[in-house]
Amino acid sequence: MSEMTHLERFRAEVPRPGLADLRDQERRLLTAIAGTGPDAAGTGPSGPVRRRGAMPRLVAGLAVTTVLAVAAVIGFTLVQERAGTATSYANAAIDIELRGDEYVATIKDPFADHALYSEGFKALGLDVGLQLVPASPTRVGDIVRYGSSGTNGDDKLGGGLSPEGCAPGSPGCALTVTVSKGFSGKGTVYLGRPARPGERYGAHAMAEAKGEMLEGYDPVERTVGEVAAEARKRGLTVVYQIITPDEGGDGFSVSPDEQSARVGDHWVVWAAESESAGTVRLLVSEKRVAKNPVYGDSRPNAPSD
């Protein structure tokens, strides 16, 4: 019987063990062949018992063949692990696991190097990047924006807070990102995270929204003097962005050269945004126009005084 026949019989008859078992088998076989294991030498009644100097050729061949077969199975198992069949991954920044038809990534460290997030997705065969953006309180957990290329109709990206509606920073409340199983293209998700003290928000919210700094007060289309007085009562700092309304009120432009102009109390506030913790930004112009240049006719969720 040829050595290749022995190899084929070995592969057919030996059941697929786990990776740890395979490594243990490989170690034992190599140890036995090298003569360094517990079976290589012993102690007899009259002293050490020497092992035989040479193995019969066929036995030696079978032993080597067996080792090669075990190595082949181990290699196949490792290739499977590295070919995207893994269903979970974890490092210090992110924990990813397959749940049904989508991968759910739980952010463990929202201030970590973004490369650690990509590392997790790459380990599972997903070309997905994650950027966490400092956000005002009501934008934490929002997908600020996302982009993708080379995708199909079944490829989906998502994200938010888990459990849905939980309070950021409270026990058990986590930022999550979802990626559909088999995501075939390249994607990047920008997700709002809590801001560090003094950090400017990259994802803003209306300052008058519930949960924001001017909650319960409507600053829109009031004078700068009125809004600034309300902000001071709340212990807030005010900064300004000077805008130039387009004719007809359909939008506006911003010129960097005009931002140093002195803003008067009679100027008009068209919108107020959360700039950073304790600071609101007012979008203002000197002249009043008939139509709000920021919101037009579709201002969302205007509060009532």
Image (cartoon, grey):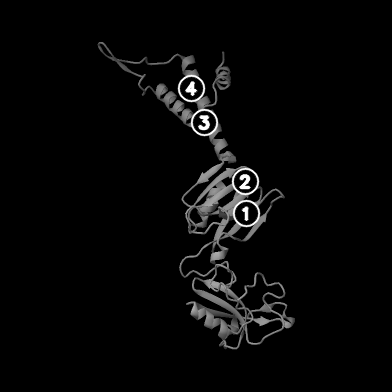
Identify the residue under disc 2. 102
Q: Nearer the viewer, residue 141 or 173?
A: 173
Q: Amino acid at mark 1?
A: Gly
Callout 2 environment at 10 Å: few (<14), some (14 to 19), or many (20+)?
A: some
- Residue tagged by mark 3? 74
Does dot 2 land on a helix, a strand or a loop? strand
Q: CA distance from mark 1 to mark 3?
A: 37 Å
Q: Which mark is residue 242?
A: none
* Distance of label 3 from label 2 (alpha carbons): 29 Å
Residue 3 x/y as whole percent? 55, 18
How far apart are the two marked residues, 2 and 1, measured between alpha carbons? 10 Å
Pointers 1 and 3 in contact (C-beta within 8 Å):
no
The reply to whether callout 3 and callout 4 are in contact (CB within 8 Å) is: no
In the rendered image of this protein, does residue 74 appear above or below residue 272? above
Q: Earlier in the sequence, mark 4 or mark 1?
A: 4
Closer to viewer: mark 3 or mark 4: 3
Quadrant containing the C terminus is bottom right
Q: Position of residue 172 (x, y in %)?
A: 49, 52
Taking 81 as reference, is 212 above or below it? below
Number of numbered discs: 4
